[in-house]
Image: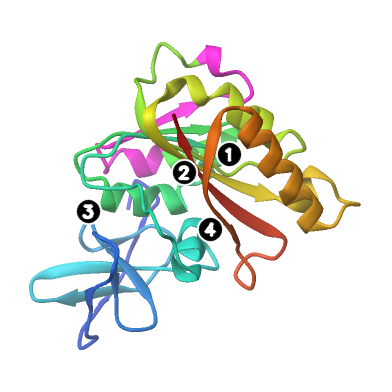
Amino acid sequence: MANGNKVRRVARGVQIRASDIPSVYTDGERLFTGNLVPGVAVYGERLVAQDGVEYRQWDPRRSKLAALVKKGVGVFPFGRRTDVLYLGAAQGTTVSHISDICVEGMIYAIEVSRRAFQKLFDLSEHRANVLPILADAEAPETYERVVAPVDVLYQDVAQRDQVEVFRRNLKFLRPGGFGVLIEKARSANVAAKPKDVYARTRRELEAAGLGIVQETPLDPFERDHAAFLVEKG
């Protein structure tokens, strides 16, 4: 297809049911989201049809948000009308699943790599709730006129000052909104033990006035990564 996505044969016979998390589905082992663009796979994922609905398999080894869901999340802040600011959107793998979930919301997808952005842009052409923005998440002033207040701030960037980038973008998060910071320990400090990096991250997030709702290491799906779910007062 012109948009760079792949048309996949749709499998049948898999018994998919609602999970404990709204808009996320399971067959008892694997995760799925309802496909907003039926017949089209974004990154080669399996498509499954059941009772007139098409689902996309959500791979926890390809998406850190899926890894968090598999590990267990007490609060899942994404819903049908949720607006999201996504920092480090890359080619749009996780963005596409959030798009499936937040069908009436808007996902502002920030990506600095031009090569990755092209695929993200192609994705957005068939998903009206994704707005791709070519920008550096370290400089939120460059997109503050485009991004409206959001319900969720989600960050997945690989650099040393991950918490500082997150903190700079908190201005877009509504009071009472949630943040999900994917901490990449080896990017933050290659010489430190991941548990020490996470402890420092926790202190810095609390110093920024955020309430820590949950801290979840993402092993074995993502080694030396942890997800911090926070709430803005």
Q: Is disc 3 surrounded by few (<14), some (14 to 19) or many (20+) residues within 10 Å?
A: many
Mark closest to the chain's N terminus, 2 or 4 = 4
The residue singled out by tag 1 in the image is 115
- Camera-near label (3 vs 1) is 3
Mark closest to the chain's N terminus, 4 or 1 = 4
- When asked about the image quadrant of residue 157, the answer is top right
The residue singled out by tag 2 in the image is 119
Mark closest to the chain's N terminus, 2 or 3 = 3
Residue 100 or residue 118, whichever sits in front: 100
Task: Please tell me which residue is depicted at 84% across the width and 57% down the height of the picture.
Answer: 193
- Camera-near label (2 vs 3) is 3
The answer to whether mark 4 and mark 1 are in CB contact below 8 A is: no
The residue singled out by tag 4 in the image is 64
Q: Amino acid at mark 1?
A: Arg
C-alpha distance separating marks 4 and 1: 21 Å
Q: Tell me where residue 89 appears, x and y as whole percent.
A: 51, 41
C-alpha distance separating marks 2 and 3: 17 Å
Mark closest to the chain's N terminus, 3 or 1 = 3
The answer to whether mark 2 and mark 1 are in CB contact below 8 A is: yes
Query: Would residue 52 appear left or right of 47 to someone viewing this image?
Result: left
Residue 122 is one of the magenta-drawn residues: yes
Query: Would residue 64 appear left or right of 202 to someone viewing this image?
Result: left
Q: Amino acid at mark 3?
A: Leu
The answer to whether mark 4 and mark 3 are in CB contact below 8 A is: no
Query: Would residue 172 appear left or right of 224 to someone viewing this image?
Result: left
Vertically, is 196 above or below 49?
above
Looking at the rendering, the stretch of residues picked out in magenta corresponds to 121-142
Task: Please tell me which residue is depicted at 27% across the width and 52% down the height of the picture.
Answer: 101
Q: Tell me where residue 125 appears, x and y as whole percent.
A: 30, 38
Which secondary structure, mark 1?
helix
